[in-house]
Image (tube, rainbow, N blue to C red):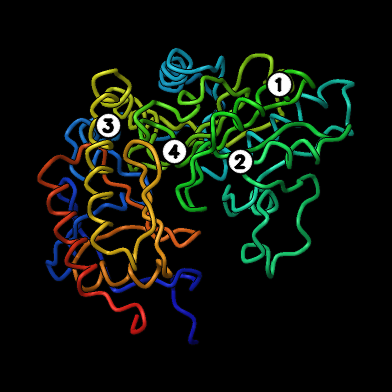
Amino acid sequence: MSITPLMPVYPRCGVRPVEGDHCHLIDEDGTRYLDFASGIAVNLLGHSHAGLIGAIQRQAEKLMHVSNLYGSPQGEALAQRLVDATFADTVFFTNSGAEAVEAAIKTARAYHQHEDGNSDRFELITFSNAFHGRTMATISASNQEKMHKGFYPMLAGFKYAEFDNLDSAKALMSDKTAGFLVEPIQGEGGIRPASDEFMQGLRALCDEHDLMLVLDEVQCGVARTGKLYGYEHYGIEPDIMATAKGIGGGFPLGACLATEKAARGMGFGTHGSTYGGNPLAMAAGMAVMDAVANDEFLAEVTEKGERLRARLEQFIGNYPDLFELVRGKGLMLGLKMKVESRPFFVHLRDNHQLLTVAAGDNTLRVLPPLVAGDAEFDEFIEKLSAGAASFEPEDA
């Protein structure tokens, strides 16, 4: 047999980490890499945070899993913490971002279809270049052919509008529309923040037509942008929100948050999860909230983001043929390139031991752990500068 034991769905690179040290990863051969990918915006506290590690260790000694047949003091505590800190009244815990978005889609449909509701209201308007996950529903919610190929037919119930274009969204509305599903800041799509007018316009349309505003904050949530959640930048609140990635700090955890009104269709038996909300994940989530859900930490992320952005904007001026602009919020930053970004991302990784993340729209994602400081930022700029100086696009 020629197939590998790990199903070959990832084009894995030669970096093989076995240990983490704050903002660095250490390969099995001892090579140290500066990790400004953070497991794709997951390891927001770095790789050796005493509070997170200690919470997981203590909980592992007590109880890891019991299922959702029983009461969950751990889940109740973290759910209350999230409710107190956000727009939401209720929380469903999942193991991943895709599951959180799935729960959000079901919640939006159930809002209209509960009891003897309107079964024709099932369509969600989504947006170009979005990424919502890899399940059948979440790839159907994306307009990207590369994620559809080989998995047809897609699920019905999604229409695609142009991102950050309110008129495009309005044009798709009908008596079948249940709501909008949108990332306030697109991650995979190239670190593209929506405008205030767009987000506020979607909120107004939902209020006017009794629709659900569903936010996918899997990547931009949990302090990444200098706010606990990205919607806070826009002066609005969603009805339903998916969160994951950073919320577990590296432990698999996601959640679907909703208002009481939005969750009216999610009663007994409508949804479930074997592992979702397990005590070990709840311990990780509480440790993350202990660290990030306070004004001081969020202000630090904002300040660090402004400093790093200023340094990046100064840096790209030295390489006008390579870089176009810097965009993003907080420590969710993107370098839009004038050439294909993936070869540069590989060059930084393989030749300068700097880990970043490639994205759409020729963008290089810069997603450092939120605990990174001046020493890590200095090292980052040094490696990035060396990488830009030695990069030859035509040979990449």
Residue closer to the observer: 108 or 73: 108
Q: Tell me the crowding category of disc 2: few under 14, some 14 to 19, or many 20 or more residues within 10 angstroms, Cα based.
A: many
Check disc 3 and report its element: helix, strand or loop.
Answer: helix
> How far is the residue under mark 2 from the one under mark 4?
16 Å
> How far is the residue under mark 2 from the one under mark 1?
34 Å
- Which residue is denoted by mark 1 in the rendering? 267
- Which residue is denoted by mark 4 in the rendering? 220
Q: Nearer the viewer, mark 2 or mark 1?
A: 2
Residue 9 appears at what percent x and percent y? 50, 69
Sequence-wise, the earlier of marks 3 and 4 is 4
Judged from this view, the residue extending furthest toward the bottom is 1
Sequence-wise, the earlier of marks 1 and 4 is 4
Residue 308 appears at what percent x and percent y? 24, 43
Looking at the rendered structure, which numbered label has been put on residue 301? 3
Give the quarter of the image for residue 258.
top right
Kind of residue at disc 2: Asp
> How far is the residue under mark 3 from the one under mark 1?
38 Å
Looking at the rendered structure, which numbered label has been put on residue 371? none
Kind of residue at disc 3: Val
Looking at the rendered structure, which numbered label has been put on residue 164? 2
